[in-house]
Image (cartoon, rainbow, N blue to C red):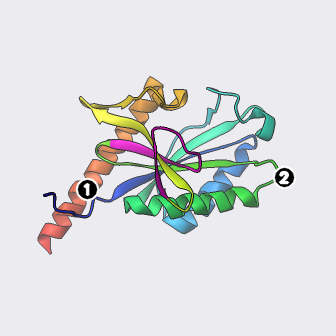
Amino acid sequence: MSQPRDPDPVKLIASIFSPQEPLIQEVISKLCLQYGPVDWVSPPMFFDRTRYYEREMGWPLHRRFVSFEQLIRPEDLVQIKLNTNEIERQYLEGENRQVNIDPGYIGLERLILATGKNYVHRVYLSHGIYADLTLIFKKGSFRPLEWTYKDYANPEMISMFNNLRKRYMDQLRQRRKVEQEQ
């Protein structure tokens, strides 16, 4: 019989994109008020692997990834997604979003994104939110799956996530060291 135990905390990340680049920094500031300081912000990039959002948001779309210093419990992802949905609503122009925020987390074994859309590989969590298994960590690197979004499967992005995983591992080591000293 398996013995239930609490999982390790995980590293909160978010993808933020908008047709208005200045909105991205404004949203990062709002996220920091809720989840603490960021410990990494990606360089500016374009969200250009799909034109799925063009009709709603316009084109081109600017993008940044962020990771947060404070680790979270995996189950907190549901409330975080609900909160980011509310921030998106604050930036509606009519029915159209001006910003998209996709929160997720990095754990030792996987990268999970939160979504409100069901699909075969997504596991229901609660309150209309699903966990999307986006990348798995295997043989020293994150690896895409057959359903992984093209941008997340890009080797440059995987390298970025591998570096964030290293940062996360350092945080876990430090946390365990402090716990052992207590």
Q: Which residue is mark 1?
A: 172
Q: Residue furthest front?
A: 1
Q: Position of residue 42 (x, y in %)?
A: 52, 41
Please state which of residues 165 and 4 is positioned toward the viewer in this rendering: 4
Q: Inspect the magenta stretch and tell me whether residue 123 lies in it.
A: yes
Q: Quadrant of residue 173?
A: bottom left
Q: Quadrant location of residue 140?
A: top left
Crowding near pointer 2: few (<14 within 10 Å), some, many (20+)? few
Residue situated in front as seen by the camera: 121 or 148 = 121
* Mark 1–mark 2 CB contact (< 8 Å): no
- Local packing at callout 1 (Cα closer than 10 Å; few below 14, some 14-19, many 20+) is some
- Which quadrant: the C terminus? bottom left
Q: Residue at x 35, y 55 (%)?
A: 10
Compare residues 173 and 117 and report the one nearer the observer. 117
- The secondary structure type at the circle numbered 2 is loop
Identify the image quadrant of residue 3: bottom left
Q: Amino acid at mark 2?
A: Glu
* Residue highlighted by disc 2: 93
Which residue is at a point 48% across and 61% down the rendered structure image?
37
Q: Which region is colored magenta? A: 110-125
